[in-house]
Amino acid sequence: MSSLKDVLEANREKILKIPGVVGVALGISPTRPGERCILVYIDTETRPPALPPVIEGYSVEAVKTGKGFRPL
């Protein structure tokens, strides 16, 4: 299994092309404390349908951003 960092880097551009996605990062799951995951920041009210729940065995968690969010 590839590392979480490698999986994120291999899929970053594809994830960022999904409408409603404004950023991605490595992080800790907000729904499964202690579990590392891919955090996907969204500016929509609901999770984009094209966003998969899992990529290469790692969970993908959508986090709604507030106004003024700017990825670095």
Image (cartoon, rainbow, N blue to C red):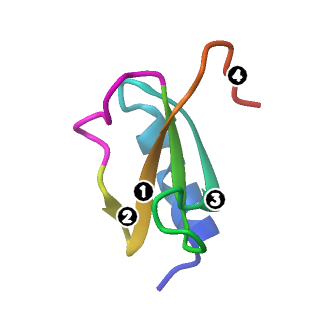
Look at the picture and state if 19 lies above or below 28: above
Q: Badge 4: how crowded within 10 Å, few (<14), some, or many (20+)?
A: few
Residue 48 lies within the magenta run: yes
Q: CA distance from mark 4 to mark 1?
A: 20 Å
Q: Is residue 11 magenta?
A: no
Q: Residue furthest top?
A: 67
Residue at 31%, 44% in the rendered image = 51
Q: Distance between the Cα atoms at labels 2 and 3?
A: 14 Å
As measured in the structure, the alpha-carbon distance from the residue carrying label 3 to the one carrying label 4 is 17 Å
First along the sequence among labels 2 and 4: 2
Q: Secondary structure at mark 1?
A: strand
Q: Mark 3 is on which residue type?
A: Gly
Q: Look at the picture and state if 10 lies above or below 43.
A: below
Residue found at x 60% / y 21%: 66
Along the polypeptide, which appears first: circle 2 or circle 3? 3
According to the picture, the residue beneath numbered tag 4 turns out to be 70
**Sequence-wise, which precedes: disc 3 or disc 4?**
3
Q: Which residue is mark 1?
A: 60
Q: Which residues are magenta?
A: 43-51
| Residue with the mark numbered 2 | 55
What residue sits 34% from the left and 63% below the top?
Answer: 54
Secondary structure beneath disc 2? strand
Labels 4 and 1: the sequence-earlier one: 1
Q: Residues within 10 Å of mark 3 (few under 14, many from 20)?
A: some
Q: Which is nearer the eye, 2 or 37?
A: 37
